[in-house]
């Protein structure tokens, strides 16, 4: 892929690269001084964003102090599931920036962003029961990466009216990236400055869009980092994340580099393998303490986990789809969220991994946190308030794994009329009938939630919903959904006799209700 893309951009001599850097420096200075629109630089700590920030830093430092009046925000989004090595690198880089901007009289403000604790990866997976992300259900990217940065950019726009977003994206990264960038060129206001298709009143500036990967490394190795961080250490980190541990020193534009190394969320199941994390562990014995992350990520990346998931969607409804099984079409329920047992198991696993990491990690890494107290509090709230699981198992699991009591950061958490004792009684009454237990728990907890209200408007609708979602056994609920499916298919074909047969069967066995009739009308 890299060879294919870089062929579109033939190698330049060192003199040509230096000339391009000089031209870009002048371009950056002119664009900066053109107006009062603040800039926002997306900084991940990787090679491309480092190169862009370094270019701009040098360009602005070349202006007289009286012209450095416009704020340049440097934003980094920590998804809270980043590779710990990379996360520590980026955080320390931001600290270094903050320590030198005043000394150098630079108008740069670093910001470390993160997702809302109600939207984190573990709240989604353990709290709400979302399955690990896949291409058809990519629920993580927007919550963890896009939303935090967009919130910040929107706030800048709200305050200042406009902004220019500076990114280190390059056409040589992939054919898809090149195609998207080329489409935006038709709408450009000037070279490398395009309208932002996602955020009104913002422009996107891409200074190194035509640079090759080896040129990025050449620039980073030959030009010193202006905020005092080590580009050579960055190079070493990329080298350590390469499978064969080979990343030759970039001495000219013909020398290959380790630019294909990718860093990202260690839980990511959108890629077949976390090659960078695997390579780090293989290449450096001192990084073997990262192994629990790789093990847990492998458990997340199970292709078929339907045995651990509910047969209903989060709404409580059974939805069917046509599944191809060895050439035969089978109409089956779309797997829903993880079951209670599975969610509790994931909680144990992440807490155990956190304990192992903290025990084995080097002192310089400090107290690494894989799941934050605020996330645990939100998971606990979802289980109790939304899932009606009033046995309140999270504190118990936390203490079993860590040996410490759980302290909820949310005020008033844990003050419930129903608890473990009542859940135990229900389990004894319901025996092996899991659906009966679920229904009784929902009914009791729904009544509990309405108890403190001065007007209990809506309680009957809420109780009715409990019966609609939890009164049938799994087999009965699936059979009922399949009958609806057959009815709709017959209606599409205009098969009146089949519809009559299905309707007569429903009335005969008493399986239809008003909601079914409404769905089929």
Image: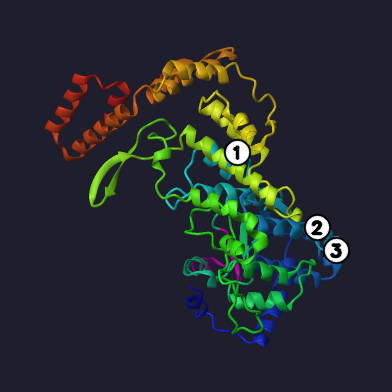
As displayed, is residue 261 above or below residue 129?
below
* Quadrant (top left/top right/bottom left/bottom right) for the C terminus: top left
**Left or right, residue 296 beside residue 15:** left
Q: Nearer the viewer, mark 2 or mark 3?
A: 2
Q: Residue at x 62, y 57 (%)?
A: 202
Determine whether the residue tagged by mark 3 lies in a helix, strand or loop.
loop
Viewer-proximal residue among 165 and 421 = 421
Query: Given contact means CB atoms under 8 Å apart, are the residues at marks 1 and 3 in contact?
Result: no
Residue 199 visible to an observer of this rendering: no
Task: Left or right? Give the position of 1 relative to 249.
Answer: left
Q: Residues within 10 Å of mark 2 (few under 14, many from 20)?
A: some
188 in the magenta segment: yes
Q: Disc 1 versus disc 3: distance between alpha carbons?
A: 38 Å
Numbered tag placed on residue 118 in the rendering = 1
Callouts 2 and 3 close, C-beta under 8 Å: no
SS of the residue under disc 2: helix
Q: How many labels does the image show?
A: 3
In the rendered image, which quarter is residue 454 located in?
Answer: top right
Write the start and end of the magenta stretch as one range: 182-196
| Residues at marks 2 and 3, CA–CA distance in whole angstroms | 11 Å
Tell me which residue sits at (17%, 31%) in the image: 499
Give the mark toward the camera: 1 or 3. 1
* Outermost residue toward the right in this view: 103
Mark closer to the chain start, 1 or 3: 3
Local crowd at mark 3 within 10 Å, few (<14), some, or many (≥20)?
A: few
* Residue at mark 2: 98
- The answer to which quarter of the image holds residue 55 is bottom right
Where is 76 relative to 387, above or below? below
For disc 3, the marked residue is 105
Along the polypeptide, which appears first: circle 2 or circle 3? 2
């Amino acid at each position: 892929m890299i060879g294919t893309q870089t062929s579109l951009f033939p190698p330049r001599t060192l003199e040509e690269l230096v000339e391009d850097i000089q031209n870009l420096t002048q371009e950056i200075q002119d664009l900066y001084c053109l107006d009062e629109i603040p800039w926002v630089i997306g900084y991940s700590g990787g090679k491309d964003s480092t190169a862009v920030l370094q270019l701009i830093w040098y360009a602005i430092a070349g202006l007289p102090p009286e012209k450095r009046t416009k704020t340049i925000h440097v934003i980094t989004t920590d998804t809270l599931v980043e590779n710990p090595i990379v996360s520590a690198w980026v955080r320390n880089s931001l600290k270094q920036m903050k320590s030198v901007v005043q000394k150098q009289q630079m108008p740069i403000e670093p910001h470390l962003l993160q997702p809302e604790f109600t939207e984190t990866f573990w709240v989604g997976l353990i709290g709400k029961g979302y399955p690990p992300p896949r291409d058809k259900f990519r629920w993580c990217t927007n919550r963890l990466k896009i939303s935090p940065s967009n919130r910040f950019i929107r706030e800048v726009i709200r305050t200042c009216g406009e902004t220019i977003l500076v990114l280190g994206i390059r056409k040589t990264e992939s054919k898809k990236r090149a195609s998207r960038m080329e489409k935006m060129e038709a709408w450009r206001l000037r070279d490398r400055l395009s309208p932002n298709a996602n955020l009104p009143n913002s422009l996107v500036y891409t200074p190194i869009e035509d640079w090759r990967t080896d040129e990025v490394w050449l620039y980073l190795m030959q030009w010193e980092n202006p905020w005092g961080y080590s580009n050579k250490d960055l190079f070493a980190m990329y080298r350590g994340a390469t499978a064969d541990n080979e990343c030759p020193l970039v001495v000219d534009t013909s020398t290959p580099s380790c630019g294909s190394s990718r860093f990202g969320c260690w839980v990511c199941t959108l890629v077949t393998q976390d090659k960078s994390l695997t390579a780090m562990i293989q290449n450096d014995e001192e990084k073997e303490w990262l192994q629990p992350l790789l093990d847990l990520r492998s458990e997340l990346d199970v292709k078929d986990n339907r045995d651990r998931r509910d047969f209903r969607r989060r709404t409580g409804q059974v939805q069917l789809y046509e599944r191809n099984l060895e050439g035969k079409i089978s109409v089956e329920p779309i797997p829903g969220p993880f079951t209670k047992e599975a969610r509790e198991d994931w909680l144990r696993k992440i807490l155990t991994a956190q304990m192992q990491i903290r025990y084995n990690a080097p002192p310089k890494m400090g107290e690494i946190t894989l799941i934050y107290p605020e996330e645990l509090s939100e998971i606990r709230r979802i289980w109790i308030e939304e899932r009606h699981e009033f046995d309140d198992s999270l504190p118990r699991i936390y203490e079993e794994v860590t040996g410490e009591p759980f302290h909820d950061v949310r005020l008033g958490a844990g003050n419930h009329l129903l608890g473990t004792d009542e859940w135990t009684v229900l389990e004894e009454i319901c025996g092996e009938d899991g659906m009966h237990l679920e229904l009784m728990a929902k009914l009791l907890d729904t009544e509990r939630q309405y108890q403190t209200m001065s007007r209990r408007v809506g309680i009957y609708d809420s109780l009715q919903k409990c019966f609609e979602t939890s009164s049938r056994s799994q087999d009965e609920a699936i059979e009922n959904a399949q009958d609806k499916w057959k009815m709709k298919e017959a209606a599409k074909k205009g098969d009146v006799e089949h519809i009559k047969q299905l309707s007569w069967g429903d009335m005969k066995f008493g399986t239809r209700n008003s909601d079914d009739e409404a769905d089929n009308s």
